[in-house]
Amino acid sequence: MGGDGVFKAEMDAARSQFSSIGFPDSGPGTPGWIRCLSLDGPAGDKTDEYYRLSVGTGEITIKAAGGAGMYHGLQTLRQLFLSAAANGKQCIPCVEIEDWPRFPWRGLMLDCSRYFYSVPFIKKLIDVLSLHHISVFHWHLTDDQGWRLPIPAYPLLTEIGSRRFDKRRGRYLGGFYSHDEIREVVSFAGVRHVEVVPEIDLPGHAGSILAAYPGLGCTGGPYRVEDRFGIFEDVLCAGNDSIFDLAAAVFDTLGELFPSKYVHIGGDEVRFKRWEECPKCQNRLHETGLNEGRELQSWITVKLAGMLKERGKTAIGWDEVLEDSPRYGLPENVAVMSWRGVKGGIEAVRRGRQVIMSPNSSGCYLDYKHHDDLEEPGQLGISRISQLYALDPLAGMEGNARSLVLGAQANLWSELIYAGKIAEYMIFPRICALAEALWSGNAGPDDFLERLTGHRRRLDLLGLLQYRGEP
Ligand SMILES: [Zn+2]
């Protein structure tokens, strides 16, 4: 492999990917048979992800304007190598490919709170996601069932909040990622041009915070790291200023560890009962001129988004952040992730906010079953491969609003996904369908099904467990 020396990191990553499937760097004859070059001439309006791949009889050339495009070109080549290797061949077809994505945000969320996944598993997953040109790994790091991120000023978050007692197994489960491990994941993903976006779920889904620091709840506890699954009444106390001290410490740590400009602040499924009953929260209502406890969520969102803005970050919230916000509004630097169908996304772009579509009604929830069968793992609904391939993030959006749609992502919540192998089964090959819908657009369901066999063979060769039933 050779080139003009610009794309060393991308070439190093590809070199080991290629040799692991039987295509060593020495190639047919010369060490320089794959040439990685900067795009000649002006890049114009070409996105950083644009590339041209030319496979001729004697050599392979990839040209790109930026590192992301070069990496994508190398991954397309890796797909060709994988297809050849899956068929027991050492040759690939001559092709000319000019390629760039339809949407910049092509994501997968992994819930590492309900079940704790190891760093090697996460790295393996990110590598395979990058093979499919997925651009965002959304890392769900906190929830009622476990806190996974060490915060130096709040050591109990991990000492107490990272472990839950599992009654079924009669022992503690959990874990957390050290700062070095997080840096390792972020750097590994960075070389693969996958952006790691952390999520800290506030002010609901906060059971692990409350177990560690009960003073941050309305009742003072006692609380526990939840072993049950569901939605719980206990949330952070909106009347206690200390919750923002905690948020500041968390945001500072995130700023040190994650280069992404986005921080996901959750905001989903908050119950308001405690706020209605708590004297401190009632004081807060008077002080802020609000009438109902539920409106405090919007007030908190404004505060958190402001704190992130001071740190140069943009907040992302689940679509609940749109609700009850007439008094305090929705800050400019809040992007909305639409999960309860598409209506939150449509409303957010109408209000001029950026949107990532992840509708549970259109296949984006990978904890749902692949299809309606008692033998299939999964819960709550059905998310079919064909639904994901048919996903159009712009459906229902009008005119200029469409430019606010960054893309879409699939989410794997892990209440029932208690092992990496089960996670693989839920992710593949559904993510292949979504990746293609977001990169190229939907060319009709039969079009993708023709290629599904090829996807399956490549996934097999990579040793991934996958669903093989009806699409
Ligand atoms: Zn309260």
Image (cartoon, rainbow, N blue to C red):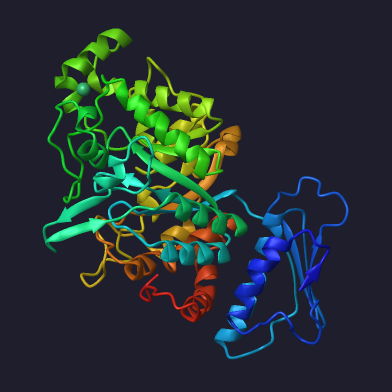
Choose between 332 and 99: the one closer to the eye: 332
Give the quarter of the image for residue 412.
bottom left
* Residue depicted at 23% across the width and 34% down the height: 213
Give the quarter of the image for residue 280.
top left
Rendered-image quadrant of the N terminus: bottom right
Identity of the residue furthest to the bottom in this view: 88
In the figure, 259 relative to 374: above or below? above
Choose between 447 and 360: the one closer to the eye: 360
Q: Would residue 394 be visible to someone looking at this image?
A: no
In the figure, 114 relative to 277: above or below? below
* Residue depicted at 55% across the width and 69% down the height: 447
Residue 98 in the figure: left or right of residue 136: right
Where residue 350 sits in the image (x, y, percent)?
49, 29
* Residue depicted at 23% across the width and 32% down the height: 235
Where residue 218 sits in the image (x, y, percent)?
18, 25
In the figure, 442 relative to 74: above or below? above
Residue 145 in the figure: left or right of residue 309: left
Choose between 318 and 383: the one closer to the eye: 318
Choose between 228 and 343: the one closer to the eye: 228
* Residue depicted at 24% across the width and 44% down the height: 144
Ligand 1 sits in which quadrant?
top left
Rendered-image quadrant of the C terminus: bottom left
Count of picture labels? 0
Where residue 359 sits in the image (x, y, percent)?
39, 47
Q: Would residue 116 be visible to someone looking at this image?
A: yes
Where residue 56 sits in the image (x, y, percent)?
80, 78
Residue 84 in the figure: left or right of residue 2: left
In the figure, 91 relative to 352: above or below? below
